[in-house]
Structure formats: C-alpha cells, structure tokens
Amino acid sequence: MPLIEVTLVEGRSPEQLRALIRNLVKAACDAVGAPIEAVRVVIREVPATHWAAGEETIAERRARGETGRETQESGKPDD
C-alpha cells in the first residue's frame, strides 16, 4: 500500500489540495500498479510562520512582497 506524504506551506485552496491528491494517486497507480483504493495520501500544512528558508520565515518574505515562487514560462508557479 503506497503512502505519499506531502508537506506544504499553508495557503492553498481546498480545490488545489484535492487536485494534488488526485494527481498523486494517479501517479502512484501508474508508477507501481497499485489499486486506487490502496493509495494513501497525507498532506501536512505548515503555517508560514513555522517554515523558514535560511533565517527568514515564509511569512516574513510574504510581508516584504516576495512569494518565494519562481514563475515558469507558462506563468504558473513552480511549487
């Protein structure tokens, strides 16, 4: 039974989290042949004040106007 654990900084919508789950389950089924009902997904959302890059929290970066996300050619965030 595959168990996929994901840790993210909080802030995504329920729809985005649902899409992530759907895509992770599909990828696991395709990659290892697991039946869909056997795949487990755990998403942990960490407050932006509890996640740091270097000595600066994501909340501090956001307060300065930085998202911490680079933009791909498609215009979509890459994280």
Image: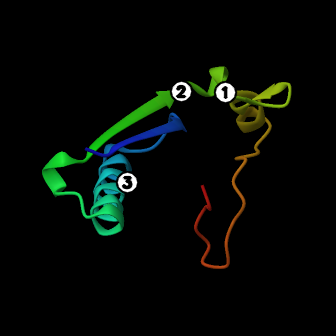
Is 4 or 69 nearer to us in this picture?
A: 4
| Disc on res. 51 | 1
Element under disc 1: loop
Q: Which residue matches tag 3?
A: 20
Tell me the SS state at disc 2: strand
Q: Where on the picture, by quarter, is residue 12?
A: top left
* Rendered residue at 14%/49% (across/down): 37
**Amino acid type assigned to the residue bearing label 3 in the image:** Leu
In the rendered structure, the answer to whether residue 19 lies left or right of residue 49 reads: left
| Foreground pick, 44 / 36 | 36
Q: 10 Å neighbourhood of mark 3: few (<14), some, or many (≥20)?
A: some
Which residue lies under the disc numbered 2?
Answer: 46
Query: Gap in Å between the C-alphas at discs 1 and 3?
Result: 20 Å
Which circle's residue, 1 or 3, is located before the other in the chain? 3
Q: Position of residue 6 (x, y in %)?
A: 46, 40
- Amino acid type indicated by mark 2: Val
Q: Are marks 1 and 2 in contact (CB under 8 Å)?
A: yes
Of mark 1 and mark 2, the one earlier in the sequence is 2
> Which residue reaches farthest top?
50
